[in-house]
Image (cartoon, coloured by chain):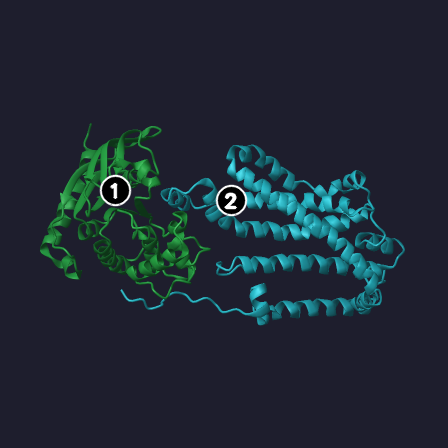
């Protein structure tokens, strides 16, 4: 059964069509990136999967349930570009927030927070406040929080977009390790071609006005990916492939009507 | 990735410094200015031979403060109770109303312009009216005017705080299927706290103004405002000034108390000192 199933989804905001006729299925354990220029609706699509935005027509389902039910059942965790940590909560309490809302008892929460801190390698920082952490560390807390309740699906909206290149590459490695350890499915929105190719099992290329899927590219790079993956000739071939797909979408947009 | 603690470490604070948000050393320039101004005041009045009814010497005010300390303390305490009562009543109601207006936003949209307008009018002008509503000798008349003065700044600030939540933080709560009550408890209210304290600090000053000025329009004989007014009328300016000093100290005490509670409550804020 697919983790995510999107059937003929269209989303209009007033006069603009943000998404048109989107069909997409994502299988368990996949790492799927949505890539495209600004205005192609990739963040909107992510929010429709998360039931944070309702489609104008069509439907999204998660784990075989309507997106709304999946949200209520807490089937997914979400990470934004900003870490969106609650300033008044310590690292441990930020990670525990979804567990509190899910009415976990204190002992279970404490154990789970400890486990998540180990996963994102932030043990020792549990009683720090967000302002005491660097941007990269904040984002790791945000990932730990999204995964704390073991959701089947992790939605990520340009999670490393605000970080510097070095931190970004380190967190990419980190994310792949977490993805393998947790066994969850990831939908990842990004602007970066290299990041999409490096992380993904599949790259969904989108184009704007109206937002639609223009190409889906399977990435057959060896798993697990390592630092040397970025130097693999196959990596560059895929990067080129995605870049050309993006430009094709762009040219279509510019073609005279 | 290594976990070397590269993060910013909090500045250690202790004792009073923690409460007021600064170390004692940081207060030194302010203390020097205060001492300097008082010294200059004393010297100028002596040098220019200014008449006491225009401006008494600080040394005279200090002596009067000490000589009439029992009377001043009683009057100050009486007025402080009015101010505190008005502050608690006005601010408490304002926070409750703000919660209601933030929860039912249509109501807030309809009423907020009036709150902002009311915030801009000189409410103290109503003091003679509250004096007739309640007996001028009664504390209630001053409590009410102080409460009305406190109400609007606290309301406007609280409402702004409750509604200035990061939209992503709300999306996150929706992703956890959190209800409206949970969102208020865990996101809106904590976000609003710094705004609420800003309002409360403004309100402490207004509460003291409300109580003292309310008493200028008539009050109990042992009230601070009445004391200042009657002494000024019979040209006992040193005593009037001593009363003003007490009023200032009372207002300051209320302000510092709220600022200290803010410090203890907003432990997560890196620095609330301006």
Callouts 2 and 1 in the same chain: no
> What residue do we see at 65% from left, 39% from top?
B118
Residue A222, compared with residue B181, is above or below; it is below
Residue B4's spot in the image, x, y percent?
Answer: 33, 68
Front residue of this view, candidates A248 and B182? B182
Mark drawn on residue A37:
1
- Badge 2 marks a residue whose secondary structure is helix
| Discs 2, 1 touching: Cβ within 8 Å | no
Front residue of this view, candidates B140 and B127? B140
Q: Is residue A193 visible?
A: yes
Residue B12's spot in the image, x, y percent?
Answer: 49, 69
Mark drawn on residue B162:
2
- Chain cyan in the figure, letter: B
- Chain green in the figure, letter: A
Q: Is residue A135 visible?
A: no
Q: Quadrant of the C terminus of chain A?
A: top left
Q: Quadrant of the N terminus of chain A?
A: top left
| Residue neighbourhood size for the residue with mark 1, other residues' Cα within 10 Å, grouped as few (<14), some (14–19), many (≥20) | some
Look at discs 2 and 1 and give the one toward the viewer. Answer: 2
């Amino acid at each position: 059964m697919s983790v995510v199933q999107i059937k003929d989804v269209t989303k209009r905001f007033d006069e603009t069509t943000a998404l048109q006729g989107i069909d997409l299925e994502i299988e368990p354990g996949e790492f799927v990136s949505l890539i495209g220029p600004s205005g192609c609706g990739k963040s909107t699509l992510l929010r429709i999967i998360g039931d944070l935005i309702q489609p104008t027509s069509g439907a999204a389902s998660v784990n075989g349930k309507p997106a709304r039910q999946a949200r209520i059942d807490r089937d997914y965790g979400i990470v934004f570009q900003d870490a969106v940590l609650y300033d008044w909560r310590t690292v441990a309490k930020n990670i525990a927030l979804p567990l509190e809302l899910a009415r976990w008892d204190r002992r279970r929460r404490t154990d789970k927070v400890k486990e998540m801190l180990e996963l994102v390698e932030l043990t020792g920082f549990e009683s720090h406040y967000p302002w005491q952490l660097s941007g990269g560390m904040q984002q790791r807390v945000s990932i730990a929080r999204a995964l704390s309740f073991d959701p089947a699906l992790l939605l990520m909206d340009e999670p490393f977009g605000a970080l510097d290149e070095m931190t970004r590459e380190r967190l990419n490695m980190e994310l792949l390790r977490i993805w393998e350890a947790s066994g969850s499915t990831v939908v990842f929105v990004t602007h970066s071609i290299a990041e999409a190719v490096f992380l993904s099992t599949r790259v969904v290329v989108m184009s704007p006005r109206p937002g639609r899927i223009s190409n889906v590219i399977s990435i057959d790079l060896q798993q697990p990916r390592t630092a040397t993956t970025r130097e693999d000739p196959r990596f560059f071939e895929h990067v080129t492939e995605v870049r050309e797909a993006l430009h094709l979408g762009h040219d279509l947009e510019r073609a005279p009507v | 990735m290594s976990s070397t603690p590269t993060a910013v470490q909090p500045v250690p604070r202790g004792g009073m410094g923690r409460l007021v948000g600064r170390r004692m050393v940081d207060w030194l320039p302010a203390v020097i200015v205060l001492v300097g101004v008082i010294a200059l005041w004393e010297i100028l009045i002596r040098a220019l031979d200014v008449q006491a009814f225009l401006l008494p010497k600080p040394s005279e005010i200090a002596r009067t403060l000490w000589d009439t300390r029992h009377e001043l303390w009683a009057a100050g305490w009486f007025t402080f109770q009015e101010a505190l009562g008005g502050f608690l009543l006005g601010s408490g109601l304002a926070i409750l109303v703000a919660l209601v207006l933030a929860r039912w936003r249509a109501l807030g949209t309809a009423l907020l312009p009036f709150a902002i307008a009311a915030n801009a009018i000189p409410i103290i002008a109503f003091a003679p009216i509250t004096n007739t509503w309640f007996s001028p000798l009664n504390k209630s008349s001053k409590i009410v005017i102080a409460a009305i003065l406190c109400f609007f700044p606290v309301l406007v600030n609280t409402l702004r705080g409750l509604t200035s939540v990061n939209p992503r933080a709300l999306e996150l709560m929706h992703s956890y299927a959190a209800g409206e009550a949970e969102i208020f408890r865990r996101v809106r209210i904590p976000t609003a706290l710094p705004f609420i304290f800003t309002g409360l600090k403004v309100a402490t000053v207004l509460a003291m103004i409300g109580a003292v000025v309310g008493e200028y329009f008539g009050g109990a004989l042992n009230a601070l405002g009445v004391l200042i007014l009657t002494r000024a009328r019979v040209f006992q300016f040193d005593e009037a000034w001593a009363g003003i000093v007490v009023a200032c100290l009372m207002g300051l005490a209320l302000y510092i108390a709220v600022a200290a509670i803010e410090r203890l409550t907003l432990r997560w804020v890196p620095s609330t000192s301006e």
